Amino acid sequence: MTAHPAVGLVPQPREVEPRHGHVVLGADATVWSDPELTAAARWWRRTCEDAFGVTWDLRVGAGIGTGTGTGTGTGTVFVLDGQLPAGGYTVDAEGSTITVTAADAAGAHAAAQTLRQLLGPAAYRRAGAGAVAVPAVRIDDEPRCSWRGLLLDVSRHFMPKDGVLRMIDLAAAHKLNVLQLHLTDDQGWRIEIRSKPLLTQVGAWRTGSGVGTWRAERVDETPHGGFYTQDDLREIVRYAAARGVTVVPEIDVPGHCQAAIAAYPELGMPGAAREVRQSWGISDGVVRPTPATVAFFAEVLDEVLEIFDSPVICLGGDEVPTTPWHGSAELEAQAAELGLGGVDELHVWFVAQLARHLAERGRRASVWDEASGPLLPADAVVCSWRGVAQGADAMRAGRDVVLAPEQFVYLDHRAGDGPDEPVPVGFVRTVDDVYGFDIEPPPVQEALADGAPGRVLGAQAQLWTEHLDSGRRVDFAAFPRLAAFAEAVWTTPERRDLADFRRRLVEHHLPRLDAVGVEYRPLDGPLPWQRRPGVQGWPRDLEAEFAAAGWAGAGGWHPE
Ligand code: ACM
């Protein structure tokens, strides 16, 4: 059998049945859609119009494709079928019609991305002409998990809005459905809060940036900054929704707050640094965790909730040095009054107050694993990043979990161990390593076998940007490893095959990324201009850390 283009799909669908020939959609084709699937239908039409120069009719109507006589002829039909598994779809391309049946809007978006992949690299260009020829095929598909996330850190280095929209396109192209925007950190506050203008007037700008690991103590003097207006963020949220992606905003508290404290010093402990941080690493920029500070951030969140419709809002809670709180008579008295075991427990208490604020407004909090604890509302989601043992523990405590372990899915970590890797930090995580990640690592399997009541919602790849100071550097870190991650969270383990993935990647998927203009890391190493000679990284040894700390990992803040 000659290779059918459908075999080049990434991620690999559940079932692919190649047929002979093509469905050719000319200039007079139509797109029919059930009203619930219109966003995907519109996206499919626009994508083909841009890439192939066609102009298609779009007809939307209830019951399309269900035998009422509408939705037949040359074109694409998007049919709703509630019997399919959530997020699932089928594609039936034969003769003159492509029929997509989708369980829901998410399934239709996934199907539309599959159709685009079937068209090859030309479909990834924004202007072109020619036939829209979809190989005849039958595909049955459904996602392995419901949270297929990508975190983009826009605080350490600001990514202008256009770049965020492009990352949404790229996430959607890989059937990822969550973009977590890390909007606040020590090095910059990036979301306009109208009632607290200094957060961006002061907190969005710094006078220099670290060069390489903070341990090298090198800082350049190039000012850096930027922020998204609320209108920008509304646009980002709508743009993402039109592609099946939910934007989860992250407001990181009570640590990683030096930029907020620079703007409003009363948020910080006496003596706290008063400028937006320039260098990387864990800072002492923790808030003063009092009811007044809770009230401040509750007001921030009220504006966040007006902008973002995500059911989940991330409150951070990672890497919180509690030492600045030690010896504070005010905080000791507050902790005693609250019945806490000491000021250290104000960390989870603070996050829990805001999580409750969200719960009262119908939203779920998510937190990094350090902030997991009984004080949080029962429905709070835990993002397990220091390792996966924390996620398994949270499942035993009844929590839903997103796996984001730095040992597997931190894409800012080095993609190879050669001398040419730019600013090599973290563990070596090759394409193959990321492909080998699974949402049921041994501690999770054990928790499930023991009947842990919590669930794994899915997993999230992280793009922290201390050392990714431009969209080009983000491309290099993200791709093609994000394609491997996408298959790890979409395709069941029985259907995954590394050698086959690598073949599809090289023959079909890298040409798609080339057509988009993604500056990925070539599989055999960085191109000359992708290197950063002379900038010091901080490589870590995965085997040594695993030997020392097991599945819990050795990262995070540790008291001296
Ligand atoms: C993290 O990497 N501090 C979540």
Image (spheres, rainbow, N blue to C red):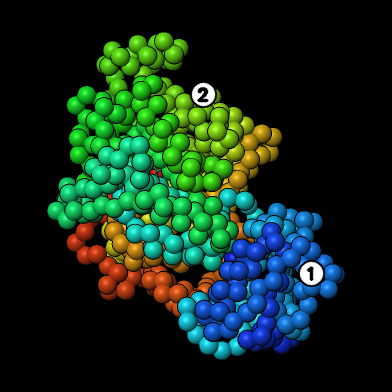
Left or right: residue 294 versus residue 286 is right
Q: Is residue 355 visible?
A: yes
- Where is residue 459? Give x, y as percent: 54, 50
Left or right: residue 216 versus residue 103 is left
Kind of residue indicated by mark 1:
Gly
- Image quarter (top left, top right, bottom left or bottom right) of the C terminus: top left
Label 2, label 1: how many angstroms apart (C-alpha)?
50 Å
Kind of residue indicated by mark 2:
Leu
Left or right: residue 269 versus residue 490 is left
- Up the image or down, 204 lies above or below 142; here it is above
Name the residue: 73% across, 82% down.
74
Name the residue: 54% across, 52% down.
246
Residue at the left extreme of this rendering:
221
- Where is residue 413? Give x, y as percent: 37, 55
Q: Nearer the viewer, mark 2 or mark 1?
A: 1
Q: Which residue is mark 2?
A: 375
- Numbered mark located on residue 65 in the image: 1
Category of crowding for the residue at label 2, using alpha-carbon neighbours closer than 10 angstroms: few (below 14), some (14–19), many (at least 20)? some
Asked whether the residues under the numbered discs 2 and 1 touch, taking CB atoms below 8 Å apart as contact, a structural biologist would say no
Q: Secondary structure at mark 1?
A: loop
Q: Secondary structure at mark 2?
A: loop
Res 42 quadrant in image: bottom right
Relative depth, front residue between 436 and 519: 519
Name the residue: 44% across, 36% down.
301
Name the residue: 61% across, 63% down.
39
Relative depth, front residue between 18 and 206: 206
- Up the image or down, 59 lies above or below 176; here it is below
- Up the image or down, 122 lies above or below 339; here it is below
Res 347 quadrant in image: top left
- Where is residue 387? Give x, y as percent: 47, 42
